[in-house]
Image (tube, rainbow, N blue to C red):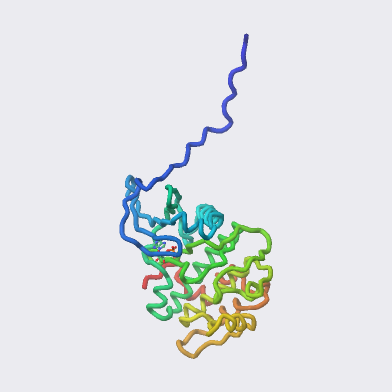
């Protein structure tokens, strides 16, 4: 009986993704401690590639019921490829721990640099804001709103290039969001009021960060949370006389800290703003 020859597969079989394990890495010095675990310098044995290995204990994740959020964070971060977004190369787990294989940011936390020097130079501030605007434009294109951009979530690589890390609060969304989240000082008025919000919350945050980079403190800082809320709602913005900051920088901040989210400067317009064009390092590199 003449049979039909087997049909060739339409696509070549997918090679399974590499299953990493802790034996693939030599563990080095601890780099830091976060809410849910520790981060170590590590080297992949075969390639000798240096990475940061984040170790998260499953019991912690279970305690706070954060499996969903962590999975979302990992999925979002692995899909993003931008020079100013920290790469997540992969992850694996054993019985007790989850390991995230991260790009190593040799310069550490931007926040620590800011506390050390109290405030940044205009060149540094403009370079970081330009890098953030570029990274956020890329994220927004992919329908990712970060919503938790603050100095603690920003790392620096060995050249002083800014890297957005920690996508714990980010959401992949095409519609307006309703959840209240983020950190108080960096919250846009519509988030303080628990109203629907969209991509423009990140633009507000860029205004807050630009102010903090230049003055060393966030613009709506107050003794109590309720006072900060009130100051944000009123957009109670003032520029101290010291340190001296250029009128162009203040102009950019004033165009971002606008209550009506539709009137905030767009990311494209931030990149074209004269202060950014004239002051930022075009390579996004800012050694201290
Ligand atoms: P986290 O758990 O993400 O808050 O990280 C805790 C600390 O580890 C941070 O404050 C950083 O100082 C350090 N760290 C985290 N990720 C990295 C990384 N990819 N490269 C270098 N240091 C890191």
Percent x, y of residue 285:
41, 67
The quadrant of the rendering that contains the N terminus is top right
| Left or right relative to 255: residue 107 | left
Compare residues 283 and 93 and report the one nearer the observer.
93
Q: Residue at x 56, y 61 (%)?
A: 170
Q: Residue at x 59, y 60 (%)?
A: 171
Q: Residue at x 52, y 33 (%)?
A: 13
Image vertical order of residue 164 relative to residue 7, above or below: below
Percent x, y of residue 108:
38, 66
The quadrant of the rendering that contains the C terminus is bottom left
Image vertical order of residue 70 relative to residue 241, above or below: above
How many numbered marks are there? Answer: 0
* Res 201 quadrant in image: bottom right
Q: Residue furthest bottom?
A: 241
* Res 262 quadrant in image: bottom right
Percent x, y of residue 77:
51, 56
Q: Residue furthest top?
A: 1
* Res 202 quadrant in image: bottom right
Compare residues 123 and 38 and report the one nearer the observer.
38
Compare residues 124 and 107 and report the one nearer the observer.
107
Percent x, y of residue 113:
39, 74
| Left or right relative to 233: residue 110 | left
Q: Residue at x 59, y 82 (%)?
A: 226
| Left or right relative to 26: residue 224 | right
Q: Quadrant of ligand 1?
A: bottom left
Compare residues 238 and 177 and report the one nearer the observer.
177
């Amino acid at each position: 009986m003449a049979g039909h020859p087997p049909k060739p597969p339409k696509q070549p079989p997918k090679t399974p993704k590499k299953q990493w394990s802790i034996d693939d890495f030599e563990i080095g010095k601890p780099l830091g401690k976060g809410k849910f675990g520790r981060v170590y310098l590590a080297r992949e044995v075969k390639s000798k590639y240096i990475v940061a290995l984040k170790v998260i204990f499953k019991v912690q994740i279970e305690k706070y019921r954060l499996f969903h959020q962590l999975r979302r964070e990992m999925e979002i971060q692995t899909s993003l490829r931008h020079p100013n977004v920290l790469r997540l190369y992969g992850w694996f787990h054993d019985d007790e721990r989850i390991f995230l294989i991260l790009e190593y940011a040799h310069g550490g936390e931007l926040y620590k640099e800011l506390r050390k020097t109290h405030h940044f130079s205009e060149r540094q501030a403009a370079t970081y804001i330009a890098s953030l605007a570029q990274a956020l434009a890329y994220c927004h294109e992919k329908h990712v709103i970060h919503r938790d951009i603050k100095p603690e979530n920003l790392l620096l690589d060995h050249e002083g290039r800014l890297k957005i890390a920690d996508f714990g609060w980010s959401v992949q969304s095409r519609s307006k969001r309703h959840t209240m989240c983020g950190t108080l000082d960096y919250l846009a008025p519509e988030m303080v009021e628990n109203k629907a919000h969209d991509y423009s919350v990140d633009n507000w945050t860029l205004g807050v960060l630009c102010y903090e980079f230049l003055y060393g403190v966030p613009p709506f800082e107050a003794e109590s949370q309720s006072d900060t809320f009130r100051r944000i709602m009123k957009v109670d913005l003032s520029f101290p006389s010291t340190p001296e900051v250029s009128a162009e920088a203040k102009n950019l901040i004033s165009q971002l800290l606008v209550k009506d989210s539709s009137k905030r400067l767009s990311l494209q317009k931030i990149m074209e703003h004269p202060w950014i064009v004239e002051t930022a390092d075009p390579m996004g590199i800012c050694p201290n």
